[in-house]
Amino acid sequence: MRSRSVVFTLSLYLSLVVLGCTSKPSTDNTTNPAAGQNNTAGQESAGNEAKEHKEAREEKKKEPLVVPAGTSVTVSLGSALGSKLSQAGQTFAATVAKDVMVGNEVAIPKGANVSGTVADAKPLGKFAGGAVLQVRLDSISIKGSDVPVQTALRSFSAKGKGKRTAVMSGGGAAVGGIIGALAGGGKGAAIGMLAGGGAGAGGAAFTGNKDIVLPAESDLTFEITQQIEVKR
């Protein structure tokens, strides 16, 4: 009986040893090289994606802001212009009167310096008895750089005989009321009315002999005819 017990005990012990040797070890990711490589690859992939997004945002910022043709730019004259005061080819200075927006961004800021040219200027008596003044913009200083611009001409004309009326083309309209002002208050009343009102809104003032005058600080609106690109 005792020998059988010894044999049974020995057999049980050997069985436990065999089972222990054949059982699989538990997986430990901390010591598994393959698992570590997978984690590293995932981190690198996430880092690359974040870098690509950042580069895309920076590239978008570098793209110029496009001001489309047809955009209006209002400027304030730095000095008076006129059919008798000015000469064809003469340059003039002005400043942007209000921000020009493209979407939610300011493309051309208020106060930017502007350069323009008097395309034509003819005083009373040298153009079929009337006066004419034409002006345009040439460039706008944005972030320290002069950006060339092309705009439609702003044209002003005054008849030398008949009705005393000023007509503006290129975005303007007839300046009415001058006849009544002349009749009611004489030359001074007409000049004061137009210089203080119409000229500031893009109109034209007149001297006593009906020459066209755009006083200093007058606001004129020009239409851009070709898109311009502004650096961000």
Image (tube, rainbow, N blue to C red):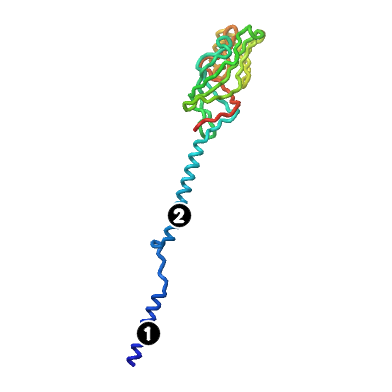
Quarter of the figure with residue 34:
bottom left
Residue 87 on image: x %, y %: 57, 11
- Work out whether 99 lies above or below 200: below
Give the structural element (helix, strand or loop) at label 2: helix
Residue depicted at x 43% and y 55%? 40
- Rounded to the nearest angstrom, the CA distance separating label 1 from label 2 is 50 Å
Give the structural element (helix, strand or loop) at label 1: helix
Identify the amino acid type marked 2. Ala
Residue 174 on image: x %, y %: 63, 17
Q: Which residue is mark 2?
A: 41
Say whether residue 121 is visible.
Answer: yes
Question: What quarter of the picture does the N terminus occupy?
Answer: bottom left
Q: Which residue is mark 1?
A: 11
Left or right of residue 192: residue 8: left
Sequence-earlier tag: 1 or 2: 1
Q: Residues within 10 Å of mark 2 (few under 14, many from 20)?
A: few
Say whether residue 186 is visible.
Answer: no
Left or right of residue 22: residue 93: right
Callout 1–callout 2 Cβ contact below 8 Å = no
Identify the amino acid type marked 1. Ser
Q: Residues within 10 Å of mark 1 (few under 14, many from 20)?
A: few
Residue depicted at x 46% and y 45%? 51
View extreme (bottom): residue? 1
